[in-house]
Image (cartoon, rainbow, N blue to C red):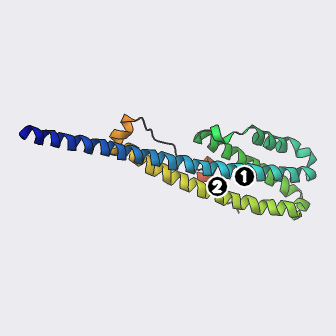
Amino acid sequence: MPGTTILIIIAVIVIFIILWIAGGYNSLQAGKIKVDEAESGIDVALTKRFDVLTKMVEVVKGYAKHERETLEKVIAMRNSVNLGNSSIEEKQKMVTQMDAAMRAINVVVEQYPDLKANDNFKQLQMTISDVEEHLQAARRVYNANVSAYNQKVQLFPSNIIAGMFHFTTREFFEAEEFKRKDVEIKF
């Protein structure tokens, strides 16, 4: 009888360990899926931003024939993008490039008052504003999911399971460097 009791205790402990590992693994896997899903939200927002930016370029082209080089760079950037296979770091670089393109377009727009009055351009400006808000929301969701996932990967006891199954931390989607700096206001 004592041998049977020991076997039952060992079996219960083994079952408990297996269930703990399975639960931990599933929790980590669910976190990873949430991060991937949130990254997909960023991809959707970036794609929409690229599309609106490309449409803005087409509208601006009609007004600014001599600004063709700047505008062609935007189109070339749009055509070379493959968001699905890009890392977060590459996506951050794309955002920086798009921001630079937006600033270049805004410089061109300032030189052509008629362009500001163009209904298509006004609509695109409102759309880009909505897209920017969507992108910011997607970033917040992504970073929240990355934070929760990274905590699971790094904190005890789930870090044991993360190590066993080679789960690694994910990178945050950070703000562009120029947006982090203090705004300099000159009078």
Q: Label 1: state its secondary structure.
A: helix
Q: Is residue 156 left or right of residue 95?
A: left
Q: Quadrant of the C terminus?
A: bottom right
Dot 2: what SS?
helix
* Residue furthest front as drawn: 1
Please report the residue visible at 16 percent of the width from the left and 42 percent of the height from the top: 8
Q: Earlier in the sequence, mark 1 or mark 2?
A: 1
Residue 35 % position (x, y): 52, 48
In the image, 185: left or right of 15? right
The residue where tag 1 is placed is 49
Above or below — where is 103 with respect to 94?
A: below
Q: Amino acid at mark 2?
A: Leu
Cα distance in 3D space between marks 1 and 2 = 8 Å
Give amino acid for label 1: Arg
Q: Position of residue 102 (x, y in %)?
A: 75, 51
At which x and y percent is residue 64? 91, 50
Left or right of 14 on screen, residue 84: right
The residue under the point 31% across, 45% down is 19
Residue at 71 percent across and 61 percent down: it is 129
Disc assigned to residue 135 = 2
Q: Position of residue 144 (x, y in %)?
A: 49, 54
Residue 123 seen in this snapshot? yes
Q: Are marks 1 and 2 in contact (CB under 8 Å)?
A: yes
- Which residue is pictured at 83% across the width and 43% down the height? 70
